[in-house]
Amino acid sequence: MRFCIITIVAALLTGSLQAQDSTDLWSKAKANPNLGRQKYIELKLHTGSHLYNGDEMSKILEHGYESVEVRMGWMSTGKQEWQRVMNYPSYGIGFYTGNIGDATVLGNPNGVYGFFYAPFARRKRHHFEAGLSLGFTYDLKGYNKDTNPLNDAISSKVDVYFNVGVSGIWRLSELFDFVYGLDLTHFSNGRTHTPNLGLNMPGIHAGLRVHYNTIRHIVQQQIDPTFVARIRPTYIDSPLSKLKHKQDWSLYGAFGVVQPDTRYGVRAFYGTASAVLDWSYLYSHVCSFGAGVDGFYDGSLGVVYGEKYGKVSTFDKMLLGAHIGHTLHLQRFDIVTQAGTYLWRRDSEKGDWFLRIGLRYNISKYGFLQIGLKTQNGAASDWIEWGGGGKL
């Protein structure tokens, strides 16, 4: 049993080793300053207010919100080049629960999500982190014209959870960090159900981060009682490879489902489609900028224009746009942000400009899957895009 534990630990954490005696294996394993897996558990308390542009729930939301988050994070060591470029980020999964207002109108939301922290301004005992989280929130109480008519912000029991923030990390000891900062939390269903003003909750947070190493006690109890595995990583500072600038062309297609605004009295679902031709240029090891053209189709415009003009054609439901954008490359994942305007449309029903925020997974060098949110005139959700594409 002792030999098996040593072999597993050494093979997983120091690379492939040929069969040797257990003493030699352990000597090589403990020479690794990052033996094990450095992780942390983070508990954060949030409080803040609502940015609400409706009328019905002004009284309900005037007292703000409170929430609690528990996150488990994996710390990077710089073993991979993108980790060194991003100043040794951490990433993981989290759980959310909150009181966002009157529970009889809004429900008692819980959520699960993935998160990513990018550190900056590092000092010996203090640094800052830019954070991004994306997932789902559930246990919401949606709009119902008979039983819950006040809720014009949420109309489904499950919404997208989005959080962005900046935190200060103050190192209290080898084990503990104090965390504090500012953040914005957003709930929206991407107009899959209406009404959907969404909830935007800016606030402050504070909490505690506890660091640990997954094999620390196993090693001491089963292998070497004198060895103490590090609970914080020793950062690898190998020089970066020479940057190879490159250009990409990509073609992306996506679909979605929406409902018209409740003022039209139509509760049916309509299809949407997006087609994007995009050019990008890699200007750093992990970042690209680019531009492209967009073709959109929104079936719900048939309801809007039918009431406005009486007669509707297929072309009335189409829009042509152009955008500029930026992409952050994190191994197989890309975070896509784009801002665009319309080159052709029937009228100004969709506003003058749009944003796209997307998460892309590269399944190969030439193909990818992507989920994104298209907005209209900034923060208002237009629809969720589910799709994929290819690159040249």
Image: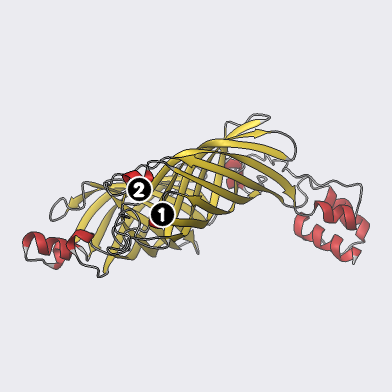
Check the image and report above or below for 127 versus 88: above
Residue type at mark 1 is Gly
Q: Which residue is found at the position 69% from the left and 41% from the top?
A: 236
Q: Quadrant of residue 294?
A: bottom left
- Give the secondary structure at mark 2: strand
Q: Dot 2, how many residues are within 10 Å of its Cα: few (below 14), some (14-19), or many (20+)?
A: many
Q: Nearer the viewer, residue 67 or 308?
A: 67
Give the image location of residue 78, x and y in percent.
65, 45
- Is label 1 in contact with label 2 (beta carbons under 8 Å)? yes
Give the image location of residue 170, x and y in percent.
64, 33
- Give the secondary structure at mark 1: strand
Count of numbered circles in the view: 2
The mark found on residue 382 in the picture is: none
Q: Earlier in the sequence, mark 1 or mark 2?
A: 2
Q: Nearer the viewer, residue 327 or 122?
A: 122
- Give the CA distance from mark 1 to mark 2: 9 Å
Q: Nearer the viewer, residue 167 or 369?
A: 167
Q: Which residue is found at the position 47% from the left and 56% from the top?
A: 108
Q: Dot 1, how many residues are within 10 Å of its Cα: few (below 14), some (14-19), or many (20+)?
A: many
Q: Which residue is found at the position 6% from the left and 61% from the top?
A: 309
In the visual, does 262 lie left or right of 50? left
**Which residue was labeled with disc 2?**
338
Which residue reaches farthest left? 310
Give the image location of residue 79, x and y in percent.
67, 48
**Which residue was labeled with disc 1?**
358
In the visual, does 101 lie left or right of 145? right
Where does the N terminus fall, quadrant-wise?
Answer: bottom right
Residue type at mark 2 is Gln
Q: Quadrant of residue 6?
A: bottom right
